Amino acid sequence: MRRALRLARRGEKWVSPNPMVGAVIVKGGRIIGEGYHEKYGGNHAEINAIRNASEAVEGATIYVTLEPCNHYGRTPPCVETLITCKPARVVIGTSDPNPLVSGKGIEALKNHGIETTVGILEKECKQQNEKFFKFIKTRLPFVTLKFAQTLDGRIATGAGHSRWISSAASLRFAHTLRSIHDGILVGIGTVLQDDPDLTVRLVRGKNPVRIVVDSHLRIPLKARILKNQDTAKTIIATICHASFEKRARLEEMGIEILTVVKDNNCRINLKKLFAELGKREISSILVEGGAGIITSTLKEELADRVIIVIAPKIIGKGIEAVGDLGSKIIGDALRLSYKKVSRKGDDIIIELQVISRKSKDV
């Protein structure tokens, strides 16, 4: 199963909104076939493993990280192929949360006399597909909030200069994060200040959909984020009172304008925005800033994971990474739990899971 998990990871940049899945076939104590879900719309892991098998699968044991599907989607049901191949046993990491699949694939295998074991390395298998699990259960994208800051918590100088706080190694890491998310989201302030491309350039991988939160359509028509629509789509989220003339000009450029209801502060309601993006099959979003978006995402408890790149620099007075979250006492503080601490170049990378305030001890 650990080998299957490693195989599954190979599809991380290409399979969304499907899950990563790996499969290994063992017969007579030997691995005779293995495969993984390589790209969205392509064969599932079990099918690739069977096709790659060096001999007949009948009587073998098949290890697969996620419950085989039992319904028609972009590909035929994997369970039917498994049953036809007559393995002696199927070992499954975790059941599939998709209501179309959940438990049905397992039941079908058992009904055809195939010994089926479920829950091997279950925690690891669920963790590997945490983005898929959240999206399939809620239809809301999994949200990763990422920002680079100095030791004293600044994301830019007082003059707004931020290039480059982090190291070259951290920048490559940031591009890797972009490549494994369906969308990347920033506020209009970041576009006006930095004029970013928000594409994947430093590593191999697909470009995410670029999303700009721009209530009043202040984005310049020459902004870099509006270019290259053939390889990197851009969505601009705005409110209904935004300029109709500007909207028309942007739409002529191939930009999708998404009108979202405003919150009590006459700004875009981020929760509603994420729900609309989920309807577009954007199952994961990397939020890259600026400070206003970072603060709003945390305040509304919309982030599932926070990644902070800490550079060994001190600016002093500057722009804070996180603004007012409304905490009056320490008990109001947003809680997080450490998932991983690593190093890229001179920087420390801290990955954390957000703990909902609803789960706090009273």
Image (cartoon, rainbow, N blue to C red):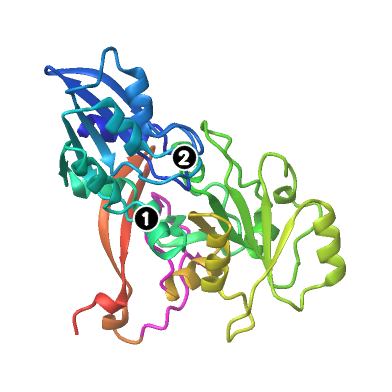
Give coordinates of residue 158: x percent, y percent: 58, 65
Label 1 or label 2, whichever comes before in sequence order: 2
Range of magenta residues: 301-327
Q: Which residue is mark 1?
A: 98
Image position of 225 (left or right of 301): right
Give coordinates of residue 52: x percent, y percent: 35, 18
Does the segment drawn in magenta span residue 321?
Answer: yes
Binning the other alpha carbons within 10 Å of mark 2 as few (below 14), some (14 to 19) or many (20 upward) gives some
Front-most of residues 123 and 81: 81
Q: Which part of the image, by quadrant, shows the N terminus? A: top left
In this view, which residue lies farthest toward the top?
54
**Which element type, helix, strand or loop, lies under badge 2?**
loop
Q: Amino acid at mark 1?
A: Asn
Q: Which residue is mark 2?
A: 15
Work out how far the residue at label 1 is from the one at label 2, CA to CA, in angstroms.
Answer: 16 Å
Q: In which image quadrant can residue 303 be found? A: bottom left
